[in-house]
Amino acid sequence: MSLLKKASSFCQKKIIPLVEKGISLCRAVMVCVAGLFSPFVRLVKKLYGRFLKTRISKVLVFIDGIQTKYFKKGQLKNYVLVRYIVKELLLYFVVAFLFFFMIFFCNQILLLAEQILKKRVPFADVCRLITYTLPSVIAQSAPFATLVGFLMCLGRLMSDNEILIIRASGQSYAIVMIPVLILGLAISIFSFFVNDYLLPVGTINYNKLYRKIIASNPGIEIEPNTIKRLNDSTIVIGDVKDGVVSDLVFFDRGNDGSQRIIVAGKSTLLSAKKDGVLMQMNMSDAVVSFLDTKNRRNFDVLASGATTLNIFDSSIFGTNYAASPREMTSFDLGRTIKNMRSKKSYSQRQLNRYVMEYNKKFSMPFGSIFFAFLALPLAFLFGKHNGQTIGLIIGLFICVLYWAMMILGQIFSSRNGLNGFIMMWLPDTVIGIAGVLFYLALKRK
């Protein structure tokens, strides 16, 4: 302790005074130096203000001009604007996609509930059937979500005067059109993948499970007091209770083209016992009439106390081939169409149906890019006030028209034999032409 006290006393008496004297000396030297250089500093300031200030200012203005002209100094970077537009478009697309997804998904659940749930099918099988229908729901939802989502997004930008600010800053409509088209193309490619790969896989598994359910419970397909149309046959069904049909009328055509009519009393539904057969009907007191379509006066009548009628899976699922068009990818479907044309053993109606399904695999997914192109001019022309609401209303109206054209195109192609290529691409063509016309109107405005 005595040693520490001695050291502390030494520092206070000797070291600290020396340090204070050194600091005072340094301050004095600095004051002297400043006094000596002050005339020189005043001279430098005077020369700078008289000769250099103006020239240096001109050089700085020249450099700033080069940065503004060539390096976009003080301007909003394009990639920032594009990133902002893409983010907004994606947000509205996701919201619109969920909206349409729920509509189509609920519709699918209601259809399954009507056909399957009331027949006491196991809940696990129903869930699997719903899962297999999801690719179809996604493929249908994406194009419509593109139109409605983009219309609402661009309409909101127009109502908030963000488009006006972009235009006032010297940017053209291309700065908005480019991300709109690129995002529309990306959605189209994703939708095509779902439609061309996931949809066939889901359809195959759906039909496989549905065949299994029908084979174990034939009453699912036979509903009471209904008329059921098969490929080339029609069944008029009476009351159905516990697998027994009270009355049954069956219209069919024989292999020789003659018309066949079967009228039966009570018929019992049984599970399939052979491959390719979905269900078996054991009919009692059946009367079979064979009518010659060329000469109506010629006919044969056959009465039987017991008759067995087999209903094949091709009658329910609408094809006599190994796979239906919905169960094929675009590559497989194109190869099948080529083989059908080379063999020339199929009817024009069958060939046209395959051509229609082939073109539908492309027209429906790539409708997104046509909708994206139409959304921009429509939103800018009609979205000045309440852009989101106007976009939603216009989008839903166009979606209904597009859906109606697609349904009518499929009906006219499959039943009336109209060209499948034209019928499937006509809605997209109409949307594309409308987009061009509205865009020209926007440019003139």
Image: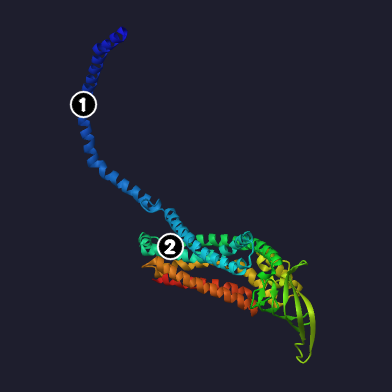
Colour scheme of the picture? rainbow
- Nearer-the-camera pick, 197 or 257: 257
The extreme bottom residue here reads 297
Q: Quadrant of the C terminus?
A: bottom left
The extreme front residue here reads 242
Horizontal arrangement in the rendering, residue 281 relative to residue 161 (left or right):
right
The extreme top residue here reads 2
**Which three-letter amino acid code belongs to the residue tagged 1?**
Leu
User: Where, by quadrant of the figure, is residue 303 drawn?
Assistant: bottom right
Q: Does 168 sit above or below residue 351?
A: above
Q: Which is nearer the N-term, disc 1 or disc 2?
A: 1
Residue ID for mark 2: 153
Residue 229 placed where, x, y %?
Answer: 67, 77
Q: Which of the numbered marks, if any, corresponds to residue 36?
A: 1
Give the number of marks.
Answer: 2
Any part of residue 181 in sight: no
Residue 425 placed where, x, y %?
Answer: 58, 72
Any part of residue 434 in sight: yes
Residue 341 placed where, x, y %?
Answer: 73, 73
Residue 333 placed where, x, y %?
Answer: 68, 66
Q: Residue at x 76, y 85 (%)?
A: 289
- Nearer-the-camera pick, 403 or 250: 250
Q: Secondary structure at mark 2?
A: helix
Q: Residue at x 24, y 41 (%)?
A: 51
- Nearer-the-camera pick, 371 or 323: 323
